[in-house]
Amino acid sequence: MNKTNNSNLTSVSKILRKNMTKEERHLWYDFLKNLPQTINRQKVIGSYIVDFYCASAKIVIELDGSQHYEDEGKEKDKARDAYLNALGIKVLRYSNLDVNRDFENVCADILRHINTSSVSLALTPSPQGEGGERLLFEALYEKRTRQRQASP
């Protein structure tokens, strides 16, 4: 078996992609999908399925519901994070509450991590210089908003 792929979980990951949570859909359609880097949804890595994975930055993005804050969930997350870290993958965790209440800052934090990753392809700096991350986020968010308003 490939160190980062488990064919037994592939069918499960396909089902999860079709049945994303409200917060996963929001993050995917309103931000991650429009980034210049390739982001995979419900990606199989070893014996785990991660919510989102950016291979160029070696970053996993996890959205945590309430089960992640119970003792068993915390232990599972700790083991999962240790496995992913051993592969050189950084894990970013955000609560569903963060996505719902502080979406802009969650997106800015993700973008900051992608841009500062040692293996990431650098985004083209904005002509305005500092604040380019915010400008990119705003442009992506506005584009998605316009697309939704144009849909019947």
Image (cartoon, rainbow, N blue to C red):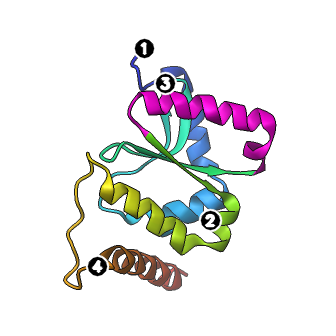
Prevailing secondary structure of the magenta residues: helix
Q: Residues within 10 Å of mark 1 (few under 14, many from 20)?
A: few
- Which type of secondary structure does the marked residue at label 2 adopt? helix
Mark nearer the N terminus (4 vs 2): 2
- Provide the residue designation for mark 4: 130
Residue 9 quadrant: top right
The amino acid at mark 3 is Gly
Q: CA distance from mark 4 to mark 2?
A: 24 Å
- Provide the residue designation for mark 3: 46
Q: Compared to 46, does 99 lie above or below?
A: below
Res 115 visible: yes
Residue farthest toward the top in the current orientation of the protein: 1
Q: Nearer the viewer, residue 47 or 131?
A: 131
- Provide the residue designation for mark 2: 99
Residue farthest toward the right in the current orientation of the protein: 70
Q: CA distance from mark 2 to mark 1?
A: 35 Å
Q: Compared to 133, does 119 lie above or below?
A: above
Res 37 visible: no
- Provide the residue designation for mark 1: 1
Q: Compared to 107, does 11 lie above or below?
A: above
The amino acid at mark 2 is Val
Task: Point out residue 126 in the picture as x, y percentages from the top left corner.
Answer: 23, 78
